[in-house]
Amino acid sequence: MELTEAGRVFVEKARSALMQIQLAVRLAHAAHAGRSNLLIIGHSPYADQAWVSSLIKIRLRTFPDLHVSIMTMFAPNLVESVRAGELNLALVTAPEDDDQIIAVPFARAPLYVAFLETHPAARSERVVLADLAKDDWILFSREVHPMVHDAILDAARRQGITPKKVHDIMGVRQAIHLVSLVSEGLGIAILSEPLALEIQAKGIAVKPIADKSLSVPTCLVMRADDKSPLIKEFLPRIPEQVHR
């Protein structure tokens, strides 16, 4: 049975509420244990796991018993949780400008396109948006990734490209079925590098997009007024990622 649009929105809001409850439980456990060395880091479901692993492996001399807790949620929820003090840090792809947060560039990677191997552009090493002008586009909705969604459509407008139709992906469950949407010929999908490189399906090709304006930054986001000694010691030890 297919969910209606209202049903999908309800499911996403319910999932967000559940994550907030999980956060509250972790914070309560930490307070009960008297733990002042707990660092809660959030990231998108589509963040490169190597990035997350590199953060977990950081060790601090002043905080030898540092405990890192990881939470997964979408970009807008990550920023909200950092502002509210529920997360200490968050890996956020293309965060919006906000006076309440500081965004430290962490890594940059191109967006990718997933399409049928029979697509005319499938033989190219890199794809330009003009190659996709005659296709329906499958994108993460503005609610899920506002800056990435806008960057794609702005780049298309600058090049005089109007996609035939834009299908929005609202959440994780739909993203899981993204391969099926592409396989069934419903359109091409434009997505972030980590998610793109996970696609290993017969008949589907995955290629990077050449447009440099669609090489999106992932930033480590923190509250602008966070003066925590733990944060101050942690940030300088963040390993530099390979910028593409």
Image: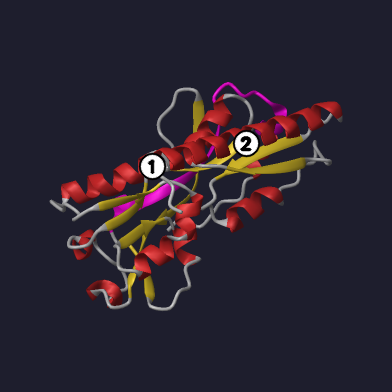
Give the residue type that dot 2 points to.
Answer: Leu
Residue assigned mark 2: 18
Q: Residue furthest left?
A: 160
Residue nearest the viewer, comparing 67 with 25: 25
Q: Position of residue 24 (x, y in %)?
A: 70, 29
Q: Quadrant of residue 4?
A: top left
Query: Dot 2: what SS?
Result: helix
Res. 172 visible in picture: yes
Residue name at image x 16 percent, y 53 percent: 161
Mark 2 residue crowding within 10 angstroms, few (<14) / some (14–19) / many (20+)? few
Residue name at image x 80 percent, y 31 percent: 30
Residue name at image x 28 percent, y 56 percent: 137
Q: Say whether residue 56 is left or right of residue 224.
A: right
Residue 114 belongs to the span the image colors magenta: no
Q: Position of residue 58 (x, y in %)?
A: 71, 48
- In front: label 1 or label 2: 1
Residue range in magenta is 211-232
Residue 216 belongs to the span the image colors magenta: yes
Q: Residue furthest front?
A: 1
Q: Position of residue 56 (x, y in %)?
A: 70, 49
Tally of marks: 2
Query: Dot 1: what SS?
Result: helix
Please identify the quadrant where the C terminus is shown: bottom left
Which mark is drawn over residue 5?
Answer: 1
Q: CA distance from mark 1 to mark 2?
A: 20 Å
Which mark is drawn over residue 49?
Answer: none
Mark 1 residue crowding within 10 angstroms, few (<14) / some (14–19) / many (20+)? few
